[in-house]
Amino acid sequence: MLITSTTGYILAVYGPYLSDSANNDAAIQKDILIHNKGNVLHWINEHDIIVVDRGFRDSTGVMRALGLDVCMPNFLKGRRRLDALEANRSRFISKIRWVVESANGRIKHFQWFNQTIQNSTLPKLSDYLQIACALINAYRAPAVSSFTHDDEIGAQMLACLHEPNTLRIRLNNETLQWTHADALDIVDFPNLTIDHIRQITVGIFQLKQARSYVEEHCSTTNLANKIDFPLQICNSDRQLIRIRFQSLHISRKGDRKVGVCSHRAATIWYLAFQRHSNEAAKIFPSGEYLQILDDSDSIDDFVESSDEDDFLYSLT
């Protein structure tokens, strides 16, 4: 188990632990704190903020008993969706906590850790892991880099924390009718830069998936031409549009005002940026990679042969 700072710097690494169900995240966390492993209690202070995911729910009591402030996403508890405040708080937490997953991924960049490890290496495994983490801290770039509008994004997130989602309230209270439309019909959708869109998504992760989302749902990889975008416009208010995108996950993020999910980010990216872009893409559309590769299967043998045959071929 790793403990990192909000910048992704690895503060401590513990283990290896058994991989059975009894050694889950919460149990490991309690073992580390109760037994003061690595003198962890000597370098954390009262009211330090511990950001964890829902897998640590059974260890929050121990953390709070030690005077730590715990931030963890809310649970649905039988509901279909989180309310606006809960969903916004969950986005705040995921915005901070992703660096832990990044640190875990960096460890697996070491080929030795990205494989099944032999039992005979277990006595040295902890030392190897400590060395790998030290190398990452010393020579890898920080997981978090500063962007031009970071302060603006942070202020925007804080301003939206307690705001209700008025669009969700309207959709719950009104019965709206929708008509299929072409993306070309949306002439008053704002033209935005990537930096502006990033301020809406409050992160880059969703933007990285935008192209693949659009390509998948429009059944084409050439987004420079006219495409069949799954768009619908509200009959009574043409300022409202909806997109029929299949999400990668069950939509339980709630009615948040902080950031947007990946399929909404993909919609904004296409309508506000991609369809207006005349610059050559820095990344090939995925379908165009096939044109780079040769395909030997396209040439058939013009003489049926076996290993025992001895034919003489000539070039003309």
Image: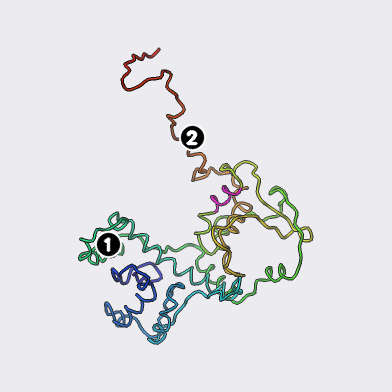
Q: In which quarter of the image is residue 61?
A: bottom left
Above or below, 285 relative to 22: above
x, y percent for residue 26: 39, 76
Instruction: Work out which quarter of the rendered image holds the C terminus and state it.
Output: top left
Badge 2 density bin: few <14, some 14–19, many ≥20, Cα 10 Å = few
| Residue at x 59% of width, y 44% of height | 219
Q: Give the range drawn in magenta.
A: 210-217
What is the three-letter code of the residue carrying label 1? Ala
In-front residue for pair 140/209: 209
The answer for how far apart the CA atoms under marks 2 and 1 are is 40 Å
Badge 1 density bin: few <14, some 14–19, many ≥20, Cα 10 Å = some
x, y percent for residue 82: 59, 73
> Of the numbered discs in the image, which one, if any, rests on residue 291?
2
x, y percent for residue 9: 35, 68
Q: Is residue 211 on the magenta stretch?
A: yes
Q: Mark 1 points at which residue?
A: 132
Above or below, 127 relative to 85: above
Q: Are discs 2 and 1 less than 8 Å apart at CB?
A: no
Q: Is residue 315 on the magenta stretch?
A: no
Residue 10 is left or right of residue 85, and the answer is left
x, y percent for residue 130: 26, 66
| Residue at x 68% of width, y 52% of height | 231
Residue 40 is left or right of residue 92, and the answer is left
Magenta stretch secondary structure, dominant: helix
Q: What element carries label 2?
A: helix
Q: How many marks?
A: 2
| Residue at x 53% of width, y 75% of height | 75
Residue 279 is left or right of residue 190, and the answer is left
Residue 50 is left or right of residue 205, and the answer is left
In-front residue for pair 126/297: 297
